[in-house]
């Protein structure tokens, strides 16, 4: 089939690469315009653009993919199917119905659970042990179209959002090719979503990352894993913001109130929480690099009784 591929983030790159290995033909790649990124806010291409340039693929980077000029170019291609993966713009009805067969999307959750922009992080935050990837037909309502294919993926107990997104991107890429083959053979089956089971995974805001030490240790552990890379799970030590990257719940009760440092050892320190303690193993002080607890303790004075708030 002749395809238009629309994607921007790293999540979309495995799908693009897998399609290039398939019998299907990518006529053009649509991605977001170059944007300022990183600490220096230098204008950089999207990961999908970088991947497309390496393969000498035709590129479009419209500010609004629904605008007249963009639609004119896409309509001229007359694609059989449009593939969307972490593109970052809402598609209008004209674009959704432009392809001769389907407009499909890769969504990293077991739909109808976790519709929306942050499905992987919300699944980890909520303590889920299993998630999945769905290929759906795109409709105007967000992530609500019929399911064309689904794969189940376990969430390891220490997995972070970036790790799971990378895994789901690979699984989704394989599933996408299977679904496109079914579309080509006219054997694809549309499974309607049950609206009664629908939940929404809203994106995180900058202030959402502050750790509530009153919560149980396992919830803080999930919180730290889920909020990587943005906004990061953080607490303040005096006036210094600490972003935590690896913590481990410790069994047993603590006599200290939540947020109090209870133990300082060579390679970790422990903080009281709602049902015991949490050991901090990796963190990043504000304006410094990410480091182990050992490195942090070698360069910072931390004492039992200090407060992380």
Image: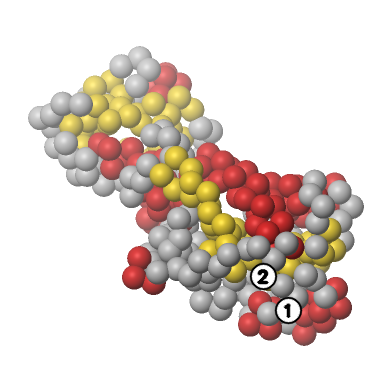
Dot 2: few (<14), some (14–19), or many (≥20) neighbours within 10 Å? many
Quarter of the image for the N terminus: give it.
bottom right
Question: CB atoms at circles 2 and 1 under 8 Å apart?
Answer: yes
The answer to which of 161 and 257 lies nearer the viewer is 161
Q: Residue at x 39, y 72 (%)?
A: 195
- Residue 80 in picture, x, y percent from top left: 78, 70
- Closer to the chain start, of discs 2 and 1, is 1
Kindly state the secondary structure of the residue where label 2 is placed. strand
Residue 308 is tagged as none
- Residue 232 in picture, x, y percent from top left: 44, 46
Residue furthest right in the image: 56
Residue on which disc 2 sits: 103
Q: Residue at x 39, y 22 (%)?
A: 297
The answer to which of 46 and 106 lies nearer the viewer is 106
Toward which corner of the image does residue 248 lie, by quadrant?
A: top left
Q: Residue at x 76, y 51 (%)?
A: 19
Quarter of the image for the C terminus: give it.
top left
The answer to which of 252 and 267 lies nearer the viewer is 252
Kindly state the secondary structure of the residue where label 1 is placed. loop
The answer to which of 246 and 93 lies nearer the viewer is 93
Residue 98 is tagged as 1
- Give left or right: position of 145 versus 283: right
- Give left or right: position of 211 versus 134: left
- Give left or right: position of 303 versus 298: left
Residue furthest top in the image: 266
> How many numbered discs sit on the rendered protein?
2
Q: Residue at x 49, y 28 (%)?
A: 291
């Amino acid at each position: 089939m002749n395809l238009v591929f629309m994607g921007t983030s790293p999540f979309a790159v495995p799908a693009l690469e897998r399609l290039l290995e398939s019998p299907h033909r990518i006529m053009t790649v649509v991605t977001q315009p170059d944007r300022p990124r990183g600490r220096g806010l230098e204008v950089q291409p999207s990961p999908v653009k970088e991947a497309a340039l390496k393969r000498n693929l035709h590129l479009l980077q419209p500010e609004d993919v629904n605008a007249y000029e963009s639609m004119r170019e896409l309509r001229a291609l007359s694609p059989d199917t449009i593939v969307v993966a972490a593109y970052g713009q809402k598609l209008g009805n004209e674009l959704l119905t432009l392809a001769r067969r389907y407009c499909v999307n890769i969504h990293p959750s077991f739909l109808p659970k976790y519709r929306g922009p942050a499905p992987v992080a919300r699944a980890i935050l909520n303590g889920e042990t299993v998630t999945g990837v769905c290929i759906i037909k795109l409709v105007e309502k967000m992530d609500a179209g019929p399911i064309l294919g689904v794969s189940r993926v376990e969430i390891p107990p220490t997995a972070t959002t970036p790790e799971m997104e990378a895994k789901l991107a690979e699984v989704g890429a394989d599933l996408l090719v299977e679904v496109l083959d079914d579309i080509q053979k006219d054997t694809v089956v549309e499974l309607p979503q049950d609206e009664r089971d629908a939940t929404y995974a809203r994106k995180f805001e900058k202030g959402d990352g502050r750790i509530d030490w009153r919560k149980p240790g396992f919830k803080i552990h999930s919180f730290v894993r889920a909020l990587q890379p943005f906004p990061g799970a953080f607490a303040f030590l005096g006036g210094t913001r600490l972003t935590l990257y690896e913590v481990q719940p410790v069994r047993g009760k603590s006599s200290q109130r939540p947020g109090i440092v209870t133990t300082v050892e060579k390679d970790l320190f422990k903080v009281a929480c709602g049902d015991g303690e949490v050991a901090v193993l990796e963190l990043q002080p504000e304006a410094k690099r990410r480091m182990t607890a050992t490195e942090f303790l070698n360069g910072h004075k931390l004492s039992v009784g200090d407060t992380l708030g």
